[in-house]
């Protein structure tokens, strides 16, 4: 009986101590604003997620909406992007780092959806609170210049 009581007292703490630590969420939120110079110029604001696909590669999914300028006025447009971002300095060893990105985009120009391939370059800055800011230039169906805010960990991009 004494053995059973001792075992009952020691077993729960021993099992609790063996729990694996919780891994941080692998995905990070992002927000962006882009000016698009194309056949129909546009200004888009969007949100998305960034998922690590290795030390140097991030997969990003973004949805954006905004105004598209036509001759007869401004129409509601937007886009959905899926991109891979190659980060040169994934461990944030320098204050700024360059990244390259490429992917596909489905763009709504105010009348119809159109598929686009995209490729671009960006520069990411220092961490301010939980966010790293970057500037990007992307080509594909026009030129897109954007500002992006991504949540990040202190020692990662």
Image (cartoon, rainbow, N blue to C red):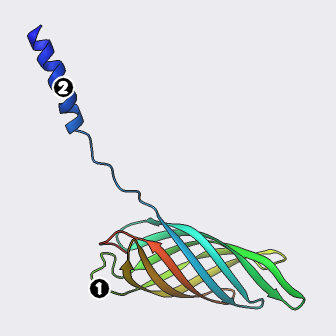
Near-viewer residue (146 or 56): 146
Residue sitting at the far right:
72
Q: Is residue 55 above or below residue 93?
A: above
Q: Quadrant of the C terminus?
A: bottom left
Work out whether mark 1 precedes mark 2 in sequence or the reverse, and give the earlier one.
Answer: 2
Q: Secondary structure at mark 1?
A: loop
Residue at the outermost front position: 129
Q: On the image, which quarter does residue 36 sit in?
A: bottom right
Instruction: Say if residue 107 shows up in the picture.
Output: no
Characterize the local packing of mark 1: few (<14), some (14-19) or many (20 or more) Cα atoms within 10 angstroms: few
The percent coordinates of residue 123 (x first, y second) are 44, 88
Other residues around mark 2 within 10 Å, as few (<14) / some (14–19) / many (≥20): few
Residue 156: x %, y % from top left: 33, 72
Residue drawn at 41 percent across, 72 percent down = 57
Classify mark 2: helix, strand or loop.
helix
Q: Is residue 39 left or right of residue 126?
A: right
Q: Are marks 1 and 2 in contact (CB under 8 Å)?
A: no
Q: Position of residue 49 (x, y in %)?
A: 52, 66
Residue sitting at 55 percent across and 73 percent down? 31
Between the C-alphas of marks 1 and 2, the distance is 48 Å
Q: Number of callouts in the render?
A: 2
* Visible residue check, residue 116: yes
Q: Position of residue 28 (x, y in %)?
A: 46, 65
Residue 94 - label: 1
Is residue 13 depicted above or below 54 in this figure? Answer: above
Height in image: 88 above or below 151?
Answer: below
Q: Is residue 151 left or right of residue 144?
A: left
Q: Residue furthest top?
A: 1
Quadrant housing the N terminus: top left
- Residue position marked by numbered label 2 in the rendering: 11
């Amino acid at each position: 009986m004494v053995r059973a009581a001792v075992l009952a007292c020691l077993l729960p703490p021993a099992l609790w101590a063996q729990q694996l630590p919780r891994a941080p969420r692998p995905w990070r939120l992002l927000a962006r604003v882009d000016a698009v110079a194309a056949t129909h110029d546009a200004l888009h604001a969007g949100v998305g997620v960034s998922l690590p696909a290795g030390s140097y590669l991030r997969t990003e999914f973004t949805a954006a909406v905004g105004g598209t300028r036509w001759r007869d006025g401004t129409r509601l447009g937007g886009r959905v992007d899926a991109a891979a971002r190659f980060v040169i300095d994934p461990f944030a060893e320098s204050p700024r780092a360059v990244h390259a990105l490429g992917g596909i985009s489905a763009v709504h120009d105010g009348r119809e959806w159109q598929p686009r391939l995209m490729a671009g370059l960006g520069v990411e800055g220092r961490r301010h609170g939980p966010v790293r800011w970057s500037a990007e230039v992307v080509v594909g169906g026009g030129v897109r210049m954007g500002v992006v805010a991504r949540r990040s960990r202190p020692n990662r991009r």
